[in-house]
Image (spheres, coloured by chain):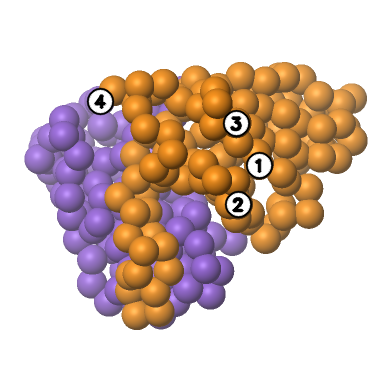
Chain colours: A purple, B orange
Amino acid sequence: QSVLTQPPSVSGAPGQRVTISCTGSSSNIGADYDVHWYQQLPGTAPKLLIYRNNNRPSGVPDRFSGSKSGTSASLAITGLQAEDEADYYCQSYDSSLSTSGVFGGGTKLTVL
Amino acid sequence: QVQLQQWGAGLLKPSETLSLTCAVYGGSFSGYYWSWIRQPPGKGLEWIGEINHSGSTNYSPSLKSRVTISVDTSKNQFSLKLSSVTAADTAVYYCAREGGVVYWSGYYGGRTYYMDVWGKGATVTVSS
C-alpha cells in the first residue's frame, strides 16, 4: 500500500488532455512537501518529468505540467501523443517516514 | 553529462546475497547522495536506500535488516548488498542520483530531493 495514491490507469485519445492525480496526506503533500513526477516508457528506466511540483527539466515538452493543492498533486498532459503511452509515478517526502523515498503506485497511461 | 552504469549477478538462489554496483561517470560524485530503487515485475517503484560520499546511509525500514549500501570514492562507485533473498526480491534494480536537494523543507523539515539521473537497471531473478 503506497503512501501516495495514484489511479492505476488513465486513457485518452490523441490530441486530448489527461490528468493523473497523486493523493497524499498531512504528513507529505499536505505538509507542503514538493511533488516530483517520473515517466517510465516500456522497458526503460524512469525519467524525471516534473520536479518541485511544476518545473520541467530541459528537454521535457511544455505539454507536460504539474500542480499541487492541499493533499494532492496532478500531472497534466495536453495534446496527447502516442509516444506519451507510459507509466507515470509521483514522489514526495513523508515526515512520518522521514524520507523522500516515497513513490506513488504508478499510473499506466494508454493512448487510444 | 552524468551517466550511471550498473552491474551485478542476475540470477540468484533463495538465501543467497544480491550484490550490485553502480559507477558514476562524467560528473561530481562527492556532492551528492546516491539511491538504490527496485521495481518487481509489473509493479511500482520501491526505494531501498541511499548513501553519500562519506558513507552516511539511510535505508527503507522494510528492508533495513537485510540491506547494506557501501561506497568506494576512489572509483566513484557505490554498491548494494541484499542478504537472504527470496523470490519476492526478484526485480529490476536501479541506481539513481539524488538531485535538487533542499535540506529544510515543508512544515516539518527534512532533506528532500528528486532522482534526476538513473541507471539503466539490472534485472535480478531469484529462483531455485
Residue B57 badge = 2
Q: Quadrant of residue A74?
A: bottom left
Label 1: state its secondary structure. strand
Q: Chain of mark 2?
A: B
Q: Which residue is mark 1?
A: B69
- Label 2 vs 3, first from the N-terminus: 2
Q: Quadrant of residue B39?
A: top right
Of marks 1 and 3, the one in the foreground: 3
Residue B89 percent location from the top left of the image? 73, 38
Give the residue type at disc 1. Answer: Ile
Q: Residues within 10 Å of mark 4 (few under 14, many from 20)?
A: few
Q: In percent of the image, x 10 and y 40: which residue is there?
A: A62
- Helix, strand, or loop for circle 3? strand
For the residues marked 4 and 1, what is the alpha-carbon distance in whole angstroms? 36 Å
Mark pair 2, 1: CA separation:
7 Å
Which of A25 and B95 lies nearest the eye of the viewer?
Answer: B95
> What amino acid type is highlighted by mark number 4?
Glu
SS for dot 2: strand
Marks 2/3: CA–CA distance: 13 Å
